[in-house]
Amino acid sequence: MSILYIPQAFSLSFDFDFSKQRWEAAEKLSLQGETKFENAIELTEKGSENSVGRASYLEPVAIWDEVSGELTSFTTTFSFQILPDPDRTGGDGMAFFLGHYPSEIPASSAGGSLGLFSSDTPNAFGNSRAVAVELDTFMDADYDSSSNHIGIDVNSLISTAYTDTNLPGRNLTSGRVMTCQISYVNSTQRLAAELQIGNASYRVDSVVDLRQQLPSIVAVGFSAATSVRSELHRVLAWSFESTLEGPRGPAAVPSPSSPFTKGVTWKIAVAITGAEVTVIVLIVIAGYVCLRRRSGRKANTRYETTPANVARSFSYRELAEATHNFAEEQKLGEGGYACVYRGELATPRRSVAIKKFKPGTSSAICTRAFDDEIKVISQVRHRNLVELVGWCSDGKKHRLLLVYELVAQGNLDEHLHGSRSWLSWTMRYKIILNLARALQYLHEDCSVCVLHGDIKSSNILLDSRYVAKLADFGLARFIDHETELKTTCTIAGTLGYVDPDFVTTGKRSRESDVYSFGIVLLEIVSGRRPAVVDHQTMVTPLLLWVWGKHHGNAILEAADATLREESTVGERGQMERALLLGLWCAHPDPIQRPPIAEAVRALQSRDVEIPHLALPAFMAGPSGFAAEDDRSRASETSDGGTSSSTTAIRGELQCTR
């Protein structure tokens, strides 16, 4: 007989006043990160940047019964303070959470992630899941709609419901001692939070089936985080009471090497006899044989197994049905090698964008493009990268398709230059940050560095909340983090965005992507297309024009006139800094360009200094700055509003290796 021990959770009730029960409370709490106990739980360190902390109850809490499906009801009340640093901007906030037991601080969860979730993924899954009530004190453009609110988070930092807490002197950052009561009623599945600040009351609620969102036993506690901002998050008192009785059974004593915390009750969970083991082994073998036979009959034979992070493979018939046999009215766009169609999948039921490689194109070229794209996109995952839903490879008929999430607001180019909605400066700045974080993830946070190779406004997609997602990895390549350059015999990219140094040398690098990012940044702020007129230098008139404004100490004039008129003084300062950063990133000398992480820091904090930018050599020509203004405007209106920058370039170089 083999014995498996698991922690046993029961209904729970406690009431801590941390100023009076310091030692008793300390023995029953788990503190993580920079959290410490000083007559109160201090979740973050005073005056510290990028501080993250958690405090949770030491024992697990049962929230639903795995046998009967019965849900718990619970009530928790806590008093707390949020004390901003008087010399700095406050942020980012704290939360009460129910999450995986034992509690662990996720990686990359500082700042607006509040120590709850990793900022690398849009939705939490597995052991990262949590249901939380957030007390947010800074508007993170990725997640929030206000800078002072209480919200309910269900496996995501995008709240399912929230209430602004912005009354003067009675808000989260007023320095007052506040009280929050959170209740969950099993009969209605309603999670509600009531916040009292002085004589002001705020309430938020949402229906949440905890059985669908969390495991049956959880950790309960608090998390908080700061980024370049600073504030102290203190929990002064905390009570908790739940109703669900955990399953009681014969207790067993755990071995000294048990990884679980002392004081937790244990039970015998599974006893498996030798005969049962034999049956299980036979079932596994039979299942394996069936799967092998089935795999031999599949039409989708390009890969034996689905690539990492891909939901599943699709048959060509499924995708044809989803697009009404790739009807013309379903077409969303068309490129050199592929057309993109809107589709409605039956399984899983969702709207998607289906990229179909053109049958008339060379089979070898299509296959290479398909392989390149799926090789990269199937191995990366970030909330600011478009999600790959699946793929189809019909080897017999050379039909290759990729299935992506469908975003609600189209691409950035359509908003800046087409008939889509006007983007305010707040929305544009959020998009800039989203793109910068996506590029930082590709260059620095992946196990292998990814060079995107085709960053442009039409490859930046916007979802229903205008969160930006970088798309189209057809030109992307892997390099080791230690590798500086990758030589390629194929020069590919988009006129106006492609790095002139890459075109000249054939050496693709991180700096090439940073150049394209800088051009997109100038495009977002100015509202002008980066079309190319001079095919010898490959320099866009937009870049020349902004350099001219900078040289004349009038760089803010390069910002869109309507943006300037409707913005505040602070927002105009952001525009000016974004334009300077765009020039820095698109510097003609790749060595002078900043790493993308430095660009992100420059966007997030004015403490990061943008160096003095000397006038580049290409500005010394006879055309003059005024002429560049004319050329920039001409490129904006040429071809009926369709710029030549949308033309992809592909050429061959003689490479020496």
Image (spheres, rainbow, N blue to C red):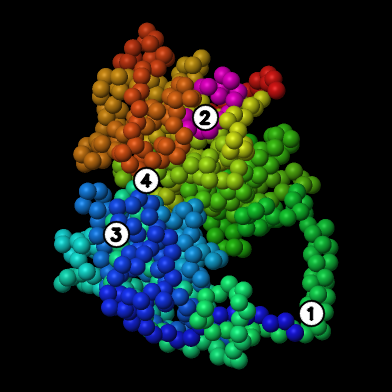
Which of pointers 4 and 2 indicates the residue nearer the eye?
A: 2
On the picture, is 314 further left or further right than 603?
Answer: right
Q: Is residue 608 above or below residue 623?
A: below
Give coordinates of residue 365: x percent, y percent.
70, 34
Is 507 a magenta residue? yes
- The residue at which mark 1 appears reads as 277
Label 3 Cα neighbours within 10 Å, binned few <14 / some 14-19 / many ≥20: many
Residue 639 visible (yes or no): no
Q: Residue 111: horizontal and vertical position, in percent?
A: 38, 53
Q: What is the C-alpha distance between the residues marked 1 and 2?
A: 57 Å
Q: Amino acid at mark 3?
A: Leu
Give the label on residue 232, or none: 3
Mark nearer the N terminus (1 vs 2): 1
* Circle 2: element type: helix
Task: Look at the numbered disc 4 and give the secondary structure of its residue.
Answer: helix
Residue 306: quadrant of the picture: bottom right
Q: Quadrant of the C terminus?
A: top right
Residue 610 appears in the figure:
yes
Amino acid identity at mark 1? Val
How far, Cα to Cα, is label 1 from label 4?
A: 56 Å
Q: Is residue 484 above or below residue 357?
A: above
> Could you tell me which residue is drawn at 31 percent across and 50 percent down?
229
